[in-house]
Each structure stands twice: as C-alpha cells, then as structure tokens.
C-alpha cells in the first residue's frame, strides 16, 4: 500500500512539473547573465537563441515571457521583433509587458521601418500591456500575417496602446492573408495616428477572417480608423468607442473598401460583419462600404 501511494505521489509530481507555467524575462538589452531566468538576468528581447529556447519549452508547457520596464527602440532602429513559427496549439505563449512601462518607440531621423513587431506563421499567442509611441516612419507597428504554407491563428492583443505615432504609413496594427484568422484586439487604445489618408489604426486585408475588436478606443486618425478590405470575413467590432477631434480629417471610423483598379476587378466584399454596441463621436460617416 505504501509503495502504491508513493508511486501515485510521484506521478502527480511529474504531471505538475509537465503542465506548470514557465516564466522567462527579456529587456531592451540583456542584463546580468542574460539567461532570461529572472528580471535581474533578463535576456535581450532580440536574441534569436532565446526565442528558440522558448519554443522548445512550449512543446511541454505554457510559457510567459515578461518584458521588463524599458524603452524598446531597437525594434525600430536595429531590427524588428520577428516571431516566426512560434507558439503551440495547446500550450499558450504570453508576451507580457510592464503596464505603461514597456514602451516600443519609433524615433525620428531613421529610414522607414517595414514593421516593428511581426507575428508570422504563429499561433496561440497573447500580447498584453505593451505601449507603442514615436513619430518615426514605419509601415506597420505590430503586424499579424501568414504565408509560405504557414498558418497564423488564435492571437490575442490585449491592453496595448498606440499613441502619438504620426509617421505610420499603413497601419498601427493589422492582419492579412487567408491563413490568418481568429485575431482579437481587446481593451486596446489608439490615439493620434497617421501620416495621411492612407494611414490607419488597424488595417485588415486580403482574405484574413474572424478578426475581432472588442472594448477598445480609437481617437484621431488621418485615414480610415479601422479598415476591413477585400474579403475580410467575419469582422466584429463590439463595445468600442470612436472619436474624432478638430484638426483631423473626416474619414470613416469603420471602412470596407475595394480597390478594383484592374479589369475585371480582383477584390470582393465579404459576407459576415457584426458591429454592435459601439459609440461614434463627430464623424460624417461612421461605417462605410465603398
């Protein structure tokens, strides 16, 4: 009887070890030993070997990577944070900032950056408590896409802020491609975004689907605030506030455009849109198909 109980305790111990949450730490640069095991020894957030090790851990357990307080401008000035083929179908990867203190900046005076944070061919990832700011020229700040036979799905972007980014060319964030799906923005804030009419807060396009924006806030954009272009299906905007102040052109808050500039056209409207319990302030057109 005693031996059987000991075996049971051992099995339970093994199961707890296998399914326990693992936490690692990164910073704007490596500190201490740089092994990422503690905040005092945070790894460089651009260290590809660190992210390879995280992916190995995900094969057996969920992983949270905490981004310690600091200025992560190197994602703009040096190279993007590129999460390619990361995540796991069952074990979630959480990227968690120090609320209001993990700040990705785009300083002026540099060449245009294509993207600062790119989630590509990845799945089951949460990004939370990140702040983005700065007027440097950038195509996309945080982009979620897929390609080359890959799939990106089950991405949650939560409690993130994009503010005072007047150098954004296309989107503060956005999704694209038919194998990109189930991307949710929740409790996010966008304020004072854009360079011209081609700039948007969230730019979704090219057959991605099941894209949801929930309980968020959009204020002052130089172009369409949220764009769902070309067969962007199952688009949801719920419980969200849209506001335009003086000094910003009167573009739609939610837009579904087609750009059929060839004959015959190659872009189509989707079928499923749900826009509910939203608040619109000071716009000639709140929702537009064109």
Image (spheres, helix red, strand yellow):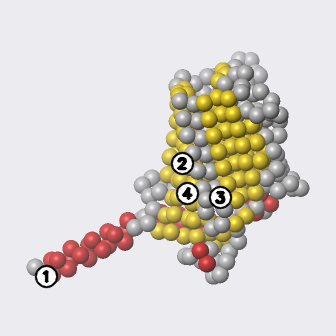
Count of marks overlaid on the render? 4
Who comes first in sequence, dot 1 or dot 2? 1
Q: Nearer the viewer, residue 155 or 213?
A: 213
Q: Residues within 10 Å of mark 2 (few under 14, many from 20)?
A: some
Disc 3 and disc 4 in contact, CB within 8 angstroms: no
Q: Quadrant of the N terminus?
A: bottom left
Q: Secondary structure at mark 3?
A: loop
x then y, percent, for residue 4: 15, 77
Q: Find the distance from the CA under tag 1 to the CA under tag 4.
A: 44 Å
> Distance from label 1 to label 3 (Cα)?
53 Å
Cα–Cα gap, marks 2 and 4: 14 Å
- Under circle 1, the secondary element is helix
Identify the mark nearer the N-term, 1 or 4: 1
For label 3, count other residues whose C-alpha is less than 10 Å away and answer few (under 14), some (14-19) or many (20+): some
- Residue that appears at 57% across and 60% down: 96
What label sits on residue 100 in the rendered view? Answer: 3
CB contact under 8 Å: marks 1 and 3: no
Residue 192 drawn at (x, y percent): 76, 42
Q: Is residue 132 above or below residue 26?
A: above
Residue denoted by label 1: 2
Q: Are marks 2 and 4 in contact (CB under 8 Å)?
A: no
| Disc 2 target residue | 156
Query: SS at mark 2?
Result: strand
């Amino acid at each position: 009887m005693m031996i059987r109980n000991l075996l049971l305790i051992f099995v339970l111990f093994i199961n707890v070890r296998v399914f326990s949450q693992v936490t690692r730490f990164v910073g704007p640069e490596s500190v201490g030993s740089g092994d990422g095991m503690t905040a005092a020894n945070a790894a460089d957030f651009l260290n590809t070997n660190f992210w390879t090790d995280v992916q190995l851990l995900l094969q057996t357990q969920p992983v949270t990577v905490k981004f310690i307080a600091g200025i992560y401008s190197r994602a703009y000035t040096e190279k993007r944070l590129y999460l390619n083929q990361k995540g796991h179908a069952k074990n979630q990867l959480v990227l968690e900032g120090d609320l209001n203190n993990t700040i990705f900046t785009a300083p002026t005076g540099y060449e245009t950056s294509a993207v600062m944070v790119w989630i590509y061919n990845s799945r089951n990832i949460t990004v939370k408590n990140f702040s983005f700011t700065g007027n440097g020229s950038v195509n996309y700040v945080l982009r979620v896409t897929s390609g080359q036979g890959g799939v990106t799905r089950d991405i949650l972007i939560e409690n993130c802020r994009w503010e005072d980014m007047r150098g954004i060319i296309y989107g503060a964030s956005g999704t694209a491609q038919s194998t990109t799906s189930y991307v949710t923005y929740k409790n996010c804030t966008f304020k004072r975004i854009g360079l011209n009419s081609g700039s948007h807060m969230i730019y979704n396009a090219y057959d991605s689907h099941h894209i949801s924006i929930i309980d968020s806030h959009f204020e002052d954009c130089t172009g369409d605030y949220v764009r769902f272009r070309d067969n962007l299906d199952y688009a949801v905007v719920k419980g969200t506030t849209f506001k335009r102040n003086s000094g910003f052109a009167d573009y739609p808050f939610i837009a579904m455009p087609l750009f059929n500039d060839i004959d015959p056209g190659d872009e189509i409207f989707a079928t499923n849109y749900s826009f509910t319990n939203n608040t619109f302030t000071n716009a000639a057109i709140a929702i537009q198909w064109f």
